[in-house]
Image (tube, rainbow, N blue to C red):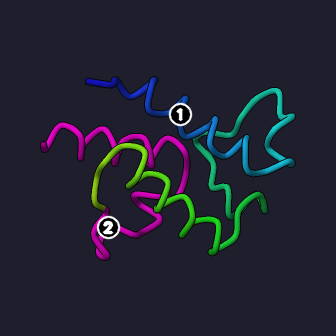
């Protein structure tokens, strides 16, 4: 079972791979909204949901697609960790 830090690292690696603006950041903003910071748009959130579902073999329900669950890397990793522990 993956811990929260391992999950967070995989999510950060995903965003760095697909986003040149994020790739070269020395300190990745894990607790801040990537949308508010201008690094990700709504399409990027949809892509990240697809990544999370495929990579971690989870299903994110429609009512879970909120800023409270997906508003930052920290929140995304907490949601994935919770879902992995529900299995």
Residue 15 coordinates in the image, percent (x, y): 67, 46
Question: Of residues 10 and 39, which is closer to you in this image?
Answer: 10
Q: Is residue 2 above or below residue 82?
A: above
Quadrant for the C terminus, please. Answer: top left
Left or right: residue 36 compared with residue 23: left
Q: Work out how far the residue at label 2 is from the one at label 1, CA to CA, in angstroms.
A: 20 Å
Residue holding disc 2 = 64
Q: Residue 34: which numbered mark, if any?
A: none
Q: Secondary structure at mark 2?
A: helix
Q: What is the quadrant of residue 34 in the picture?
A: bottom right
Q: Is residue 64 above or below residue 79?
A: below
Left or right: residue 2 compared with residue 43: left
Q: Residue 10: which numbered mark, if any?
A: 1
Q: Which residues are magenta?
A: 60-87
Quadrant for the N terminus, please. Answer: top left
Left or right: residue 20 compared with residue 87: right
């Amino acid at each position: 079972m993956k811990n929260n830090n391992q999950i967070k690292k995989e999510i950060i690696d995903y965003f760095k791979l697909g986003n040149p603006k994020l790739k070269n950041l020395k300190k990745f903003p894990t607790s801040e909204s990537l949308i508010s910071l201008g690094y990700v748009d709504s399409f990027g959130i949809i892509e990240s949901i697809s990544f999370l579902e495929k990579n971690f073999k989870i299903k994110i329900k429609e009512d879970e697609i909120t800023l409270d669950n997906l508003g930052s890397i920290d929140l995304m990793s907490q949601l994935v960790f919770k879902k992995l522990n529900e299995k």
